[in-house]
Image: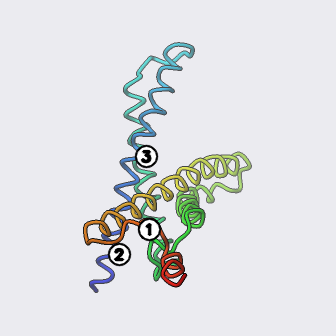
Amino acid sequence: MKKWRRRIRAALGMGLTWAVVWAGAGAIFGLVAGIYTAVWGTGTGLIFGSALFFSVQFATFGFVGGAAFSTVLAVTEGRRRFDEMSLPRFAAWGAVGSFLLALPLLQLAFDPLALDGLFGIGGVVALMGAGSAAGSLALARRADDRELLEHGGDVADIGLTEEEKRELLAG
């Protein structure tokens, strides 16, 4: 039972972390869209309103994407430590977990326009998920390195995988 509680807490933490980052991206997107519609479009010029709207929307997607990524990662890479995972593979799992956000749009798949929306939104969300996953791994590795320093580890070991450490010790 303790194991499940820890996994749920990890998924919630990942979701909240991604939500904060994605909310910032949504705010920037909303500001740009608001300025564009205020200056060149026929919009009402609600610049900060659109920033808030997109910020909330992106934060929601980020939370669900981070939680989905955490779940996918637990299922596929559950026994591996962060220093044993490659960055491209981690980013790929982030893209897969985030693409799961677009799956509810599959109910509209009978409409060809909905398929365009699925792959358009799914592609953007998958790219954001891959970037968020890569950033999450980089932060996790940095935290592991900092912990190694605090416990008196050798500075030469920082950033090395376990296999690289064994090679250094053997050769």
Of residues 19 and 151, the one nearer the viewer is 151
Q: CA distance from mark 3 to mark 1?
A: 16 Å
Q: Residue furthest top?
A: 39
Location of residue 31 with respect to 6 vertically, above or below: above
Of residues 49 and 31, the one nearer the viewer is 31
Give the residue at x 53% y 63%.
Answer: 97
- Crowding at dot 3, Cα within 10 Å, few <14 / some 14-19 / many 20+, comes out as many
**SS assignment at label 2:** helix
Left of 79 or right of it: where is 103?
right
- Mark 1 belongs to which amino acid? Ser
Q: Where 134 falls versus 76 (above or below)?
A: above
* Secondary structure of the residue carrying numbered label 3: helix
Query: Mark 1 or mark 2, which is nearer the start of the sequence?
Result: 2
**Residue at (59% x, 55% y) in the render:** 105
Q: Position of residue 21 (x, y in %)?
A: 40, 47
What residue is pinned by disc 2?
7
Give x and y (percent) for residue 95.
57, 59
Which residue of the protein is positioned furthest toward the front in this rendering? Answer: 171
In the picture shown, does residue 88 fall above or below 44? Answer: below
The 10 Å Cα crowd at callout 1, few under 14, some 14 to 19, many 20 or more, is: many
Which tag, 2 or 3, sits closer to the chain's start? 2
Placement of the C terminus among the 4 image quadrants: bottom right
- Residue shown at the point (27%, 71%) measured from the top left: 152
Q: Is residue 5 left or right of residue 96?
A: left
> Which is more toward the observer, 148 or 18?
148
CA distance for labels 2 and 3: 22 Å
Whole-angstrom CA distance, mark 2 to mark 1, is 8 Å
- The picture quadrant where one finds residue 88 is bottom right
**Circles 3 and 1 in contact, beta carbons < 8 Å:** no
Question: The disc labelled 2 sits on which kind of residue?
Answer: Arg
Residue of label 3 = 22
Dot label at residue 70: 1
